[in-house]
Amino acid sequence: MNVAQAVALNRLLPPEIVAMRAADLAQVVALEAAVQDFPWRERNFTDSLAAGHHAWILRHGAACLGFSILMYVIDEAHLLNIAIAPGAQGQGLGARLLRHAMREAARDGMGKLFLEVRPSNLRALQIYRAFGFRQIGLRKAYYPATEGREDALVFCANLEHGKE
Ligand SMILES: CC(C)(COP(=O)(O)OP(=O)(O)OC[C@H]1O[C@@H](n2cnc3c(N)ncnc32)[C@H](O)[C@@H]1OP(=O)(O)O)[C@@H](O)C(=O)NCCC(=O)NCCS
């Protein structure tokens, strides 16, 4: 197979979800900076990996199209971060990553998945609600914002073992 064929084949293959490694961090940090006004810095990602959090990337050939990071606390999982590259959003990839994270957490015996989200993040709110998340709390002035601070909505979903 020549390079052109490999590239063409690569385009046809769906992106795969693989464990995040230190070698992925440059792409992950750049992706995060492209989608967040107040992004995690490289240090946040290295600390997260060092702490043993469960992290994946959505890989398409050499490109990283998205990532997700879960933290487990006893029998509860927390979605610390999830993002899809700007040019790859709105194609179902965020849903794929979220479904994968929920399945992994359920498989690892977690009963619930918690997350925080900005009330202004309508796209994220929509996907979370579609996946069965419901608001269970509010953290006042949790996030930095362009003007002052923004609340966080705390969402939770029950993880159905053997399903999501
Ligand atoms: C939130 C995010 C991960 C979603 O990923 P995505 O790949 O764009 O989402 P998907 O294409 O899988 O869409 C999943 C669902 O989200 C909703 N959605 C997608 N695009 C939307 C839009 N433009 N407006 C509103 N809702 C939208 C829909 O419910 C959609 O389901 P459907 O279109 O099949 O009915 C992505 O937009 C992102 O990276 N945002 C920036 C980082 C971020 O906000 N992370 C979450 C922090 S809590």
Image: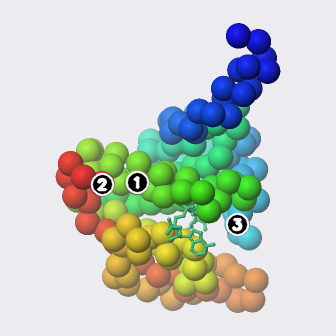
- Report the Cα–Cα distance between label 2 and label 1: 6 Å
Q: Name the residue under label 3.
A: 36
Say the numbered circle drawn on residue 19: none
Work out whether mark 3 precedes mark 1 in sequence or the reverse, and give the earlier one.
Answer: 3
Q: Position of residue 140 (x, y in %)?
A: 51, 88
Figure check: 56 above or below 81:
above
Marks 2/1 in contact by CB < 8 Å: the verdict is yes
Q: Name the residue under label 1.
A: 99
Figure check: 7 above or below 90:
above
Q: Is 82 situated left or right of 73 in this image? A: right
Mark 2 or 3, closer to the camera: 2
The N terminus appears in which quarter of the rendering?
Answer: top right
Q: Is 5 situated left or right of 82 in this image? A: right
Q: Is 22 situated left or right of 136 in this image? A: right
The reply to whether the residue tagged 3 has its Cβ within 8 angstroms of ligand 1 is: yes
Marks 2/3 in contact by CB < 8 Å: the verdict is no
Q: Name the residue under label 2.
A: 164
Q: Which amino acid does label 2 sit on?
A: Glu
As helix, strand or loop, the secondary structure at mark 3 comes to loop
| Local crowd size for mark 2, using a 10 Å CA cut-off: few (<14), some (14–19), many (≥20) | some
Instruction: Give the residue furthest to the right.
Output: 4
- Report the Cα–Cα distance between label 3 and label 1: 22 Å
As helix, strand or loop, the secondary structure at mark 1 comes to helix
Q: What residue type is labelled 3?
A: Gln
User: Which residue lies at the image location 50% right of the left edge and 76% below the top edge?
Assistant: 125
